[in-house]
Image (tube, helix red, strand yellow):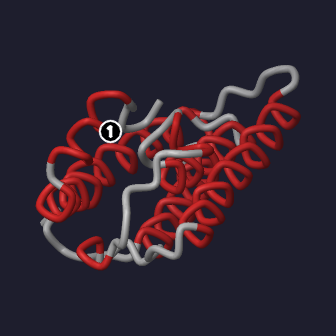
Amino acid sequence: MLDLRIPPLLLWAVFAAAIAAAAHWLPALNVPFSGQRVLAVALGVAGIAVALAGVVAFKRAKTTVNPLAPERARQVVATGVYRFTRNPMYLGLAATLLGLAVWWASLAGLVLVAVFSGWMTRGQIRREEAALLARFGDGYADYMARVRRWL
């Protein structure tokens, strides 16, 4: 099931809809708290900023941003936001989903964010890492040893 190649933005949209649905259909699992909307917006803005920083770094390096074709990568990008996370685009998507869950104060939404992150790790990131290791060898292995997958 996790070997299906689902574009990450499509998967994000499915999970965003699921978080909204869970907040609506499972109101007993919503736990509002003071400042939740401010925190939600901050998470959303931070997520968008981190994801865009990843895209910009790839564009500057003239390498592919297509997550379904990691074998087309032209180089390992290890500067900018990539000094802190190997997957800023996916981290940004997860942060925006977290922002949505917080917006609705949905405990079910928090679980869905964890499921999304696990799905991305198993179904997308590990596949990308294998392709990049095959393409760049020790250079990518050294990068993996220095920089965490998520944070």
Q: Horizontally, is 114 left or right of 16 in the view?
A: left
User: Residue 29 placed where, x, y %?
Assistant: 56, 33
Quadrant of the rendered structure where residue 27 is? top right
For the point 86% across and 20% down, the residue is 34
Q: Horizontally, is 95 left or right of 6 in the view?
A: right
Quadrant of the rendered structure where residue 20 is? bottom right
Element under disc 1: helix
Q: Horizontally, is 149 left or right of 45 in the view?
A: left
User: Residue 95 placed where, x, y %?
Assistant: 60, 43
Q: Horizontally, is 76 left or right of 103 in the view?
A: left
Quadrant of the rendered structure where residue 141 is? top left
For the point 81% across and 38% down, the residue is 42
From the viewer's perspective, is residue 4 above or below residue 81? below
For the point 38% across and 56% down, the residue is 76
User: Residue 62 placed where, x, y %?
Assistant: 52, 76
For the point 30% across and 79% down, the residue is 72
From the viewer's perspective, is residue 65 above or below residue 121? below
Amino acid tagged 1: Tyr
Residue at image mark 1: 143
User: Residue 99 placed where, x, y %?
Assistant: 68, 43
